Image (cartoon, rainbow, N blue to C red):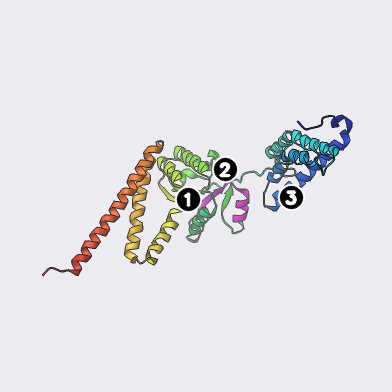
Amino acid sequence: MSANLSLLIEEPLVLLASTAGLLLLKTAVLFGLGRLFGLGGDSPARIALTLPQGGEFAFVIFGAAVAGVMARDLADLLIMVVTMTMLLTPFLFTVGERISATGAPGEQEREFDAIEEKDHDVVIAGMGRFGQILARILHIRRIPFTAIESNAAQVDFIRHFNASVYYGDVNNLDLLRAARVEHARIFVVALPDVTESIRVVTLVREHFPDVKIYARARNRHHAQLLINLKVDYLIREALVSSLEMAEEMLRALGDTEEIAEMTVQRFRTADERLLVREAAILQDEKTVIQSAEAGWRELEDLFDADELRAARHERGNNHPSS
């Protein structure tokens, strides 16, 4: 409402030059920051073309400045410049979207690798930190495997270590067939993205029902979804490390090796039983919560009973009958 539209007629060149100057300056700064902070591909260009406009707080600042430190003519010009940058933002955003669709200037889309059609016992989907550890163990045991990774930069990095890994989309059925999944004994899902993980498990279970699926679960909910898809083996990535720390912590607090190990193992067994129970009623949040509370109460009662038996046993040893 404070924009002086008459400036479009009175000083069009000054207005257009100032608007272009602000847009170019902010675009250059944003693009440089994107590169500086490691954004790859077309991301820096898209950010630069999405956020080059002046901020609406400028209207408040320039309006207040007229009270004593800025001439009205200059304030009117700057307000119109900010307004023009806002009007042009949707067009710049469209340019950014087209860059994303076609690739950054001078950058060609990389084609997926052609997979050598070899029958390997293991196919690994995802070569992040989790998948790489599995691959290293298979490598030192001289067990051949086929690994597929959808991140091109990750593939190039892993190949520096002479690892056998292919760039491709694991949710592409033709690629899975080229990887000879139907002849594999185990298909490992080591993908970090939960949605992608569920999608590929569903695809493999539907088209390659005889292959055993070993899956990595990012969290409890992911594990429940995998259970319902009937994977053959799953592991929650944070569970093992947290249990190992808990066992060491109990030792440091005075438990014997046997008691610490027994406590952690009993907890793990009860938690896995509860996980399966929750997966069966996953769609009913209220029932899941009630089941979890009941499960933990059962576990607490079990440990309380153990402590009571241990106390009675100790009293019996201290006061033998005559």
Characterize the local packing of mark 3: few (<14), some (14-19) or many (20 or more) Cα atoms within 10 angstroms.
Answer: some
Asked whether residue 187 appears in the rendered view, the answer is no
Characterize the local packing of mark 1: few (<14), some (14-19) or many (20 or more) Cα atoms within 10 angstroms.
Answer: many
Report, in whole angstroms, how far the alpha carbon at label 1 lies from the one at label 2.
Answer: 17 Å
In terms of secondary structure, where does tag 3 sit?
helix
Do the residues under discs 2 and 3 have CB atoms within 8 angstroms? no
Say which amino acid is labelled 1. Val
Q: Quadrant of the N terminus?
A: top right
Report, in whole angstroms, how far the alpha carbon at label 1 lies from the one at label 3.
Answer: 43 Å
Q: Residue at x 79, y 45 (%)?
A: 25
Along the line of sight, the residue nearer the viewer: 64 or 210: 64
Q: Any magenta on residue 155? A: yes
Residue pointed to by mark 1: 122
Say which amino acid is labelled 2. Asp
Residue pointed to by mark 2: 169
Characterize the local packing of mark 2: few (<14), some (14-19) or many (20 or more) Cα atoms within 10 angstroms.
Answer: some
**Closer to viewer: mark 1 or mark 3:** 3
Q: Quadrant of the C terminus?
A: bottom left
Q: Which residues are magenta?
A: 143-158
Sequence-earlier tag: 1 or 2? 1
Residue pointed to by mark 3: 32
- Please, is residue 299 above or below residue 89 in the view? below
Say which amino acid is labelled 3. Gly
Where residue 91 appears, as percent x and y from the top left, is 74, 33
In terms of secondary structure, where does tag 2 sit?
loop
Q: Residue at x 77, y 46 (%)?
A: 28
